[in-house]
Amino acid sequence: MNHRKTGWLDDAFHHGFREILLHALAIHGAVCPAYCLMRDHVHLLLLGWAETCQQRTLVRFLRKHTNRILRKRGFEWQQQ
């Protein structure tokens, strides 16, 4: 989270995050058997099952689309 802000993690964000994550996984041929949303960051365990899976592209997609939700709340992911 940019500047390690807190307060963005609630049920509404979690719901949106799950929807976007499932969409990203389906598009990019991967699975996520575990993730952990922390108060100022996220941990993901990503496993590509398709030969064409590019995890960096998947994470870029996930960041882009979850940032749309976060920006509406005054937050955003930090630059990589």
Image (cartoon, rainbow, N blue to C red):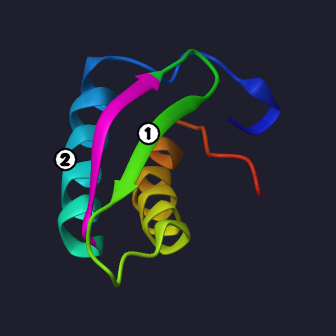
Camera-nearest label, 1 or 2: 1
Q: Position of residue 13 (x, y in %)?
A: 33, 31
Residue 36 in the image: state x and y as whole percent.
Answer: 44, 22
Q: Amino acid at mark 1?
A: Leu
- State the residue position of label 1: 45
Give the overall secondary structure of the magenta segment.
strand
Disc marking residue 19: 2
Q: Is residue 77 left or right of residue 55?
A: right
The local secondary structure at tag 2 comes to helix
Left or right of 5 in this view: 27: left
Tag 1 and tag 2, C-beta contact below 8 Å: no
The N terminus, quarter of image: top right
- Residue lying at the far right of the rendered structure: 3
Q: What are the residue bounds of the magenta stretch? A: 29-36
Image: 78 above or below 40: below
Give the image quarter of residue 3. Answer: top right
Q: Which residue occupies the foreground of this view, 14 or 49?
A: 49
Mark 2 residue crowding within 10 angstroms, few (<14) / some (14–19) / many (20+): few
Q: Residues within 10 Å of mark 1 (few under 14, many from 20)?
A: few
Task: Residue at 44%, 39% (x, y): give it.
Answer: 45
Q: Residue at x 61, y 28 (%)?
A: 41
Q: Is residue 42 above or below residue 40?
A: below
Q: Is residue 35 magenta?
A: yes
Q: Amino acid at mark 2?
A: Glu
Residue plotted at (49% across, 64% down): 64
| Res 69 visible | no
Asked which quadrant contains residue 79, the reply is: bottom right
Residues under labels 1 and 2: Cα distance? 17 Å
The residue depicted at 26 percent of the width and 26 percent of the height is 12
- Give left or right: position of 18 versus 72: left
Looking at the picture, tell me which residue is in the foreground, 71 or 55: 55
Q: Secondary structure at mark 1?
A: strand
